[in-house]
């Protein structure tokens, strides 16, 4: 199915609003045709009559058409924008859900800035598809037909001539514009996503870029992306200029052609002289409808390119899928890896090769090994961000693929190797672990994570903003926020990936003491390369490395 | 040209309709008409083309300025900003200025120039009708100005909200794995939806106000047009005005109001552009984090002395360094130790000139650090931060960041120093392996070692390692530290560590606590 047709299908729930918007748009255009019929007719009639009463019908019609046109135009614009925005809000949520389902396992190469462009700018640019595409095209079709009918009442040949011009301007020009701007639109949307992605990465890595003198090259590559956008816009500008010129010429041409055709007809009294002025003006009025269609074609092209990118994301099927019928949430909390092998990509080196270990319920094991030996991969597989290529992971007696991924994660309290802090307050970041936690619970968790003194030193306490990536905090503070999240989350299996890598020895000891108490009655897996955390575990499993 | 066309058209209709002229009689006039239409078409095409082209160029220029300003502002300034907002600003924000230039500004100029011209033509054709125009025109202009202010306010509000939303989206997208770990990713969809709804409402507020302007204006314009139609009709009945003139006046009246209507239709693009431009200039005018380069040549090899240096973030609200004094010698290694949050990384920020001291001085030899040439100074530093960033590209691309002309052999040497030659060799593509955004295809320890290799490759007089081995296992860390010790025999090395085993290799140790130097001296003295 073509991408734009799919966008159109998204409108199904609000289709009646869309129909209403089209009706209002068509109504406004028809009222204009009416106005352009009644006004010159009134004028032409005036020199021929003596009493004002003879004109009263035409006078009333002029006023009525005028008021109706303005009101309907207002209705159309309000309706079409409201409807489009409603559709886009839905779509944006759909795209988010798709990304949420895919991250991080199925998005290894997706760049966050590019994802942002898709969920933000691309979805936004679908707005014009409705407002400047669907509604004007449908309305123009209706209004053009009405204009032709009006002219055919005066003289059938006129309608035929007008129809030819309208087709040229309403179909020919837009098609040509589309053909001319298709390449430009695609390269525009692509370059924009690229630039977004580059910028997001450059802002993130700015310190390294500047320190290593790479900022010059980065600026240059931004400049090149910006150049590509400009060039695409210029190519589009040329197409737009031709379209504007052509439709202006066709509008004037239609008026003149109709007039030229009507002149002999008036002389032969085939049509009344009072209609002569009406003829070119109705033609002009009809062009008010088809004039914007060149622009509609261009906008539709941008929307099409954006829709392709958006749906590409929505259509990616996650490799890790929930089973049709899932096992119930396990009542036991042991974990076993049985001969698990895994690589992140078919061409990547193996991350795990036939790894087996067992974490019994209430047990504690440490996972050690040189860096790159797959320790973090074990955590990623346990979280079911990926599924193993071979072997089996069992949680509480059920193989992972037979459980719902959400149920699996609900069993786990995890400190990931690179905990993410959101740009919000400390409280926001802790509530991630338990949305309903009261301040007392939060502060208790912070106390266990050795954050109390730090929080007490802050003027705004829990309401302190942590900055992008939490960078207003030190590395050790960020790690302790991640630990506090685990203390806040009452889950039976505790998984810690290098939980103390950024802590000084004193803080490390204090945190480990609290973790020791917390892990009582729970199962615990600690991934580490440091000796201190291993004092907490009963058993150590060693992974062989690749380097 | 259009107005001329209207006048000619009116004459043609007049002659055929009232004087029974034949087609051949009006042929020349129709030809003129056709020529006028063609000329008008050429003009409107050219106007569209040139407007859009100029807009594209302006947007390009602004985009370059914004990205340039971001790099000048530096990483510490950016830390407080929402990255998504900055991305949006350079991405979409500048795009909003385009329509402002291509459509809003021409519309405003046309609205100022065209109506008087139309009024002048009508004055010649029929002085009575001008009365209506002269009364209706200014009234509508005043109305437009009044509502325009409301639109402007609403638009500024909307811009702020949209910027926030972009930032929020980017933050959420990046934190998705964390949200999924805690089972909150789906729940967040409702937040996204609510934010989307609110944005839609704000947007509709802006648009509705703009459309209301148009509505009032169109009512005004049509009322005036209808009035003119009725007025001239009545006078036509009395024979006070020629039919050709009457028809021309009727056709010209909408043209009088058209520029105003166009302007009102573009009224929301105007303030959106202005609001975006305002935010852009905010970024452009942001004082650079450090003073621009002065002419003082950087001393070749010199001791770096901290003299009573103080730094506070957030406008003084968060002191990080409170009067720190110590020396980094020309050769040899110095370790900064202390609990997390003691201000160790801020020392590195100061040396790299990501921040300027609020008090005290940093001297390089006998030159104040804030007087040396910035890029020359940084070219002498190799730095591995706590969260080193790798960039989309290959391992080789990332290594060459600090030394573009490095040979492959140099790369392998650096990798060997960083204990990474082994794992890179085992990758099927070797140094041509793509690392993914932020190096996410590599493990944490591998990423850290690539960053170390990048620093070794730079072979700079000063090497700063900020917790640069935190993700390495002990044997690997030992190998890396041995390489660092080698470097320190020729260059200065600043080690930031909270672990004794890293600080152990240093010749000198400075212990920090709560932004102050607690103890300093040789290993034995401090221990």
Image (cartoon, helix red, strand yellow):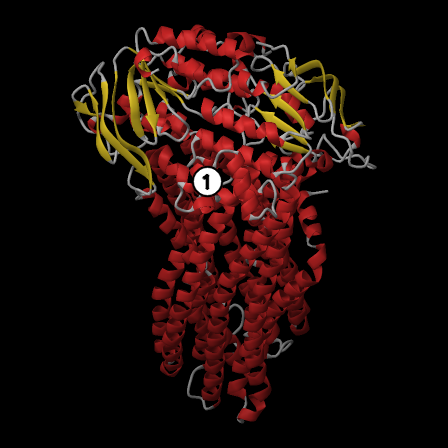
For the N terminus of chain B, which image quadrant?
A: bottom left
Image quarter of residue A260? bottom right
User: Does residue B97 appear left or right of residue A305 in this picture?
Assistant: left
Q: Nearer the viewer, residue B384 or A370?
A: A370
Q: Which residue is mark 1?
A: B87
Q: Position of residue B523 (x, y in %)?
A: 33, 12
Percent x, y for residue A35? 56, 75
Q: How many marks?
A: 1
Looking at the image, residue B303 lies above or below residue A106: above
Q: Nearer the viewer, residue A30 or B244?
A: A30
- In this rendering, would B440 be left or right of A325? left
Residue B484 position within the rendered picture, expressed as x and y whole percent measured from the top left: 39, 10
Callout 1: chain: B
Camera-nearest residue between B49 and A9: A9
Q: Is residue A453 left or right of residue B314?
A: right
On the picture, is B154 further left or further right than B521? right
Residue lying at the far right in this picture: please name it. Answer: A325
- Graded by Cα atoms within 10 Å as few (under 14), some (14 to 19) or many (20 or more), the crowding at tag 1 reads many
Whether residue B64 is situated above or below residue A511 in the rendered picture: below
Of residues A445 and A287, the one nearer the viewer is A445
Residue located 62% across and 59% down the image: A83
Query: Picture coordinates of residue B163 (x, y %)?
Result: 47, 48
Q: Residue at x 35, y 77 (%)?
A: B123
Q: In the rendered image, which quarter contains the C terminus of chain B?
A: top left
B499 over B72 or under it: above or below: above
């Amino acid at each position: 199915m073509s991408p734009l047709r799919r966008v159109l299908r998204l409108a199904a729930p609000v289709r009646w609003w869309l129909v209403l918007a089209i009706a209002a748009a068509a109504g406004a255009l028809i009222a204009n045709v009416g106005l352009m019929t009644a006004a010159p007719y009134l004028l032409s009639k005036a020199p021929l009559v003596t009493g004002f009463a003879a004109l009263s019908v035409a006078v009333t019609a002029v006023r009525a058409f005028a008021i109706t046109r303005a009101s309907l135009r207002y209705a159309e614009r309000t309706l079409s924008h409201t409807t489009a925005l409603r559709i886009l809000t839905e779509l944006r949520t759909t795209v988010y859900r798709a990304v949420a389902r895919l991250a991080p396992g199925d998005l290894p190469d997706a760049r966050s800035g590019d994802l942002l462009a898709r969920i933000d700018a691309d979805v936004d640019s679908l707005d014009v598809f409705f407002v400047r595409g669907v509604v004007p095209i449908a309305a123009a079709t209706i209004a053009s037909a009405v204009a032709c009918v009006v002219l055919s009442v005066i003289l059938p040949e006129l309608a035929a001539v007008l129809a030819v011009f309208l087709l040229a301007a309403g179909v020919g020009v837009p098609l040509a514009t589309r053909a001319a701007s298709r390449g430009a639109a695609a390269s525009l949307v692509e370059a924009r996503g690229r630039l977004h992605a580059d910028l997001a990465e450059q802002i993130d890595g700015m310190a390294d870029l500047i320190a290593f003198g790479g900022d010059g090259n980065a600026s240059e590559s931004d400049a090149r992306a910006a150049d590509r956008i400009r060039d695409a816009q210029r190519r589009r500008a040329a197409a737009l200029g031709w379209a504007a010129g052509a439709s202006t010429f066709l509008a004037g041409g239609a008026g003149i052609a109709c007039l030229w055709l009507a002149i002999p007809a008036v002389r032969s009294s085939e049509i009344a002289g009072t209609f002569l002025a009406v003829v070119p003006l109705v033609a002009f009025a009809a062009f008010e409808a088809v004039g914007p269609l060149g622009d509609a074609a261009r906008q539709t092209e941008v929307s099409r390119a954006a829709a392709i990118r958006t749906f590409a994301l929505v259509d990616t099927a996650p490799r890790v899928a929930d089973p049709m019928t899932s096992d119930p949430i396990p009542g036991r909390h042991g974990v076993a890896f049985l001969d698990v092998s895994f690589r992140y990509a078919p061409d990547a080196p193996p991350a795990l090769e036939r790894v087996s270990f067992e974490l019994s319920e209430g047990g504690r094991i440490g996972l050690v090994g040189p860096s790159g030996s797959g320790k973090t991969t074990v955590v990623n597989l346990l979280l079911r961000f990926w599924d193993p290529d071979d072997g089996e992971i069992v949680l509480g007696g059920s193989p992972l693929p037979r459980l719902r991924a959400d149920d699996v994660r609900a069993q786990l309290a995890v400190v990931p190797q690179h905990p993410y802090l959101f740009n919000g307050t400390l409280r926001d970041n802790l509530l991630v672990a338990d949305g309903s936690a009261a301040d007392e619970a939060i502060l208790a968790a912070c106390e266990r994570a050795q954050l109390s003194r730090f929080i007490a030193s802050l003027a705004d306490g829990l309401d302190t903003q942590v900055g992008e990536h939490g960078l207003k905090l030190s590395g050790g503070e960020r790690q302790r926020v991640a630990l506090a999240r685990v203390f806040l989350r009452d889950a039976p299996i505790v998984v810690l990936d290098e939980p103390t890598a950024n802590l000084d020895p004193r803080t490390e000891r204090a945190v480990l003491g609290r973790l020791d108490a917390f892990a009582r009655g729970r199962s615990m897996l600690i991934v580490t390369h440091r000796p201190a955390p291993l004092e907490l575990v009963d058993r150590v499993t060693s992974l062989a490395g690749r380097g | 040209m259009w107005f001329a066309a209207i006048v000619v058209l009116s004459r043609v209709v007049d002659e055929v309709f009232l004087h029974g002229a034949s087609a051949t009689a009006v042929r020349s006039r129709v030809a003129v008409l056709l020529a006028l239409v063609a000329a008008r078409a050429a003009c409107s095409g050219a106007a569209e083309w040139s407007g859009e082209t100029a807009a594209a160029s302006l947007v390009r220029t602004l985009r370059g300025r914004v990205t340039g300003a971001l790099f000048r502002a530096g990483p510490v300034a950016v830390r407080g900003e929402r990255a998504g907002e900055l991305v949006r600003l350079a991405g979409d924000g500048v795009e909003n200025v385009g329509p402002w230039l291509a459509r809003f500004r021409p519309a405003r100029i046309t609205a100022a120039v065209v109506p008087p011209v139309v009024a002048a033509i009508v004055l010649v054709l029929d002085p009575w009708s001008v009365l209506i125009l002269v009364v209706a025109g200014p009234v509508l202009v005043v109305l437009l100005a009044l509502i325009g202010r409301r639109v402007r306010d609403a638009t500024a509000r909307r811009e702020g909200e949209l910027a926030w939303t972009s930032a929020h989206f980017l933050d959420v997208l990046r934190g998705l794995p964390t949200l999924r770990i805690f089972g909150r990713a789906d729940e967040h969809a409702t937040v996204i939806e609510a934010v989307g709804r609110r944005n839609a409402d704000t947007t509709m507020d802006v648009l509705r106000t703009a459309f209301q302007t148009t509505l009032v204006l169109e009512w005004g314009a049509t009322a005036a047009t209808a009035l003119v139609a009725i007025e001239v009709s009545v006078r036509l009945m009395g024979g006070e005005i020629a039919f050709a003139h009457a028809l021309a006046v009727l056709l010209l009246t909408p043209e009088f109001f058209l520029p105003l209507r166009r302007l009102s239709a573009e009224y929301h693009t105007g303030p959106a552009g202005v609001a975006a431009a305002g935010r852009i200039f905010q970024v452009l005018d942001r004082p650079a984090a450090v003073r621009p380069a002065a002419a003082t040549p950087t001393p070749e090899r010199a001791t770096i002395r901290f003299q009573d240096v103080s730094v506070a973030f957030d406008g003084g609200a968060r002191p990080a360094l409170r009067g720190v004094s110590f020396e980094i010698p020309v050769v040899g290694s110095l370790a900064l130790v202390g609990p997390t949050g003691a201000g160790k990384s801020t020392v590195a920020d100061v040396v790299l000139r990501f921040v300027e001291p609020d008090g005290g001085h940093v001297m390089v030899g006998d030159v104040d650090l804030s007087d040396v040439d910035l890029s020359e100074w940084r070219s002498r530093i190799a730095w591995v931060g706590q969260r080193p960033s790798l960039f989309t590209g290959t391992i080789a691309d990332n290594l060459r960041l600090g030394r573009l002309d490095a040979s492959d052999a140099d790369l392998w040497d650096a990798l060997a120093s960083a204990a990474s030659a082994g794992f890179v060799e085992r990758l099927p593509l070797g140094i041509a392996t793509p690392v993914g955004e932020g190096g996410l295809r590599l493990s944490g320890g591998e990423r850290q070692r690539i960053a170390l290799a990048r620093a070794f490759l730079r072979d700079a007089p000063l090497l700063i390692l900020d917790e640069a081995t935190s993700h390495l296992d002990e044997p690997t860390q030992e190998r890396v530290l041995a390489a660092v010790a080698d470097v320190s025999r020729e260059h200065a090395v600043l080690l930031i560590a909270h672990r004794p085993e890293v600080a152990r290799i240093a010749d000198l140790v400075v212990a920090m606590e709560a932004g102050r130097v607690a103890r300093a001296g040789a290993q034995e003295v401090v221990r």
